[in-house]
Image: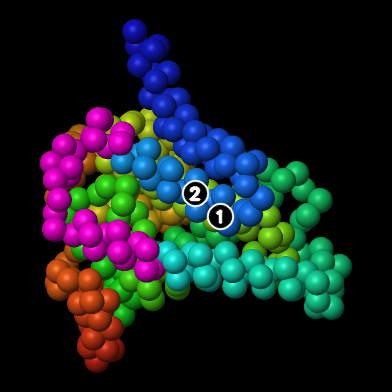
Amino acid sequence: MLFLQYTYRFTVWPALLGSLFLLHSIITSMLPHSNMAFSIAYMCAIAGLYVLERFHPQVPEWLSDDGQSINDVLLTLISKTFSYAFLQINLVLFAVQKLSDSQLGARIAGWGLWPHQWPYTVQIAAGLLMCELFFYWYHRLAHEFKPLWCFHAVHHFPKRLWVLNTGRSHIVDSTLFMAGIIPLVALGASRELISDLLIITAFIGLLSHANIAVPMGPWRYVFNGADNHRWHHSVKMDEGNRNYGQNLMVWDHIFGSYYQDPSRMRPKRIGSSLKLPKDLIGQLREPVAAFRKSLSQPLWYK
């Protein structure tokens, strides 16, 4: 019995993540346009995880509307349409293609700055570690540097976690976050590699917010997920200012910000210290006003 319990805890989370990648692979094989294939796979993943939340929630209270459900969806559409669909997929990957076709791109390729000769899985791991270093420090600064927190607080405003507030962000926050892939572009990484890293980030992001009673087991020490991310959304600053990793927890371990408390359950009381209006327009406008005000005050939280 103990063996079966351990096997379940060890395999259920990677199996769920793997099913999202499999779904994307199947849809990609059916559709020639990669952007459209990802969009459909992402929406199907959201629908499937939403159903799982209804049948097997980690926190049953979070199934109830906190008054922000519509804003969660609209902010996700606004921020992700702009930062992901427009900036990530179109501008960044377009820039990668143009760079590779240009004389400068040829020179960079000639310098061999990106190890294209490495096995593709090793390139994925290297790219993930590199992006995660930026993601980690941007995320940490967004909690500790007041001007950035003004925008990032929009993501922490809801009182519950569920799959449809995964992408709830202010446009400024989601756009700055995506600067993390610039080093890969500058080093000459392939368009396919960057696209795959963005897909990994998108699917792990869904699982880190989904309100599903699926234990991560030992994987919590390697990957980001709900087991780690619920602490990150705690209203208590000493818990919320931890677990900054987007996909991996490696930099949290290295820089001392990884947090788990096995002596008690992960927090149910989550939210933001920044007071925001409840309406959508107010949540887009108020962070700009708060940002301006923050520039005349001490810039760092103690």
Total numbered circles: 2
Please give left or right for residue 216 compared with residue 131 in the image: left
Please state the horizontal and vertical placement of residue 93, each as a whole percent of the image: 64, 66
Residue behind mark 1: 36
Please state the horizontal and vertical placement of residue 250, each as a whole percent of the image: 48, 49
Residue behind mark 2: 40
Q: Using the image as rendered, state which of residue 27 and residue 226 is in the foreground.
A: 27
Please state the horizontal and vertical placement of residue 251, each as a whole percent of the image: 47, 54
Q: Is residue 274 above or below residue 64?
A: below
When asked about the image quadrant of residue 66, the answer is bottom left
- Coloring applied to the structure: rainbow
Q: Do the residues labelled 1 and 2 touch (CB within 8 Å)?
A: yes
Please give left or right for residue 171 compared with residue 17 in the image: left
Residue at the front extreme, as displayed: 31
Is residue 19 rendered magenta in the image? no
Dot 1 crowding, Cα within 10 Å, few <14, some 14–19, many 20+: few
Q: In this view, does 112 lie above or below 162?
A: below
When asked about the image quadrant of residue 158, the answer is bottom left
Residue 228 is marked as: none
Placement of the C terminus among the 4 image quadrants = bottom left
As shown in the figure, which amino acid type bears the numbered disc 1?
A: Met
Placement of the N terminus among the 4 image quadrants = top left
Question: Which residues, given as a range, are shown in magenta?
Answer: 51-79
C-alpha gap between disc 1 and disc 2: 6 Å
Please give left or right for residue 185 compared with residue 143 in the image: right
Q: Is residue 187 above or below residue 69?
A: below
Disc 1 is placed on an element classified as helix
Disc 2 is placed on an element classified as helix
Is residue 24 shown to the viewer in this render?
Answer: yes
As shown in the figure, which amino acid type bears the numbered disc 2?
A: Ile
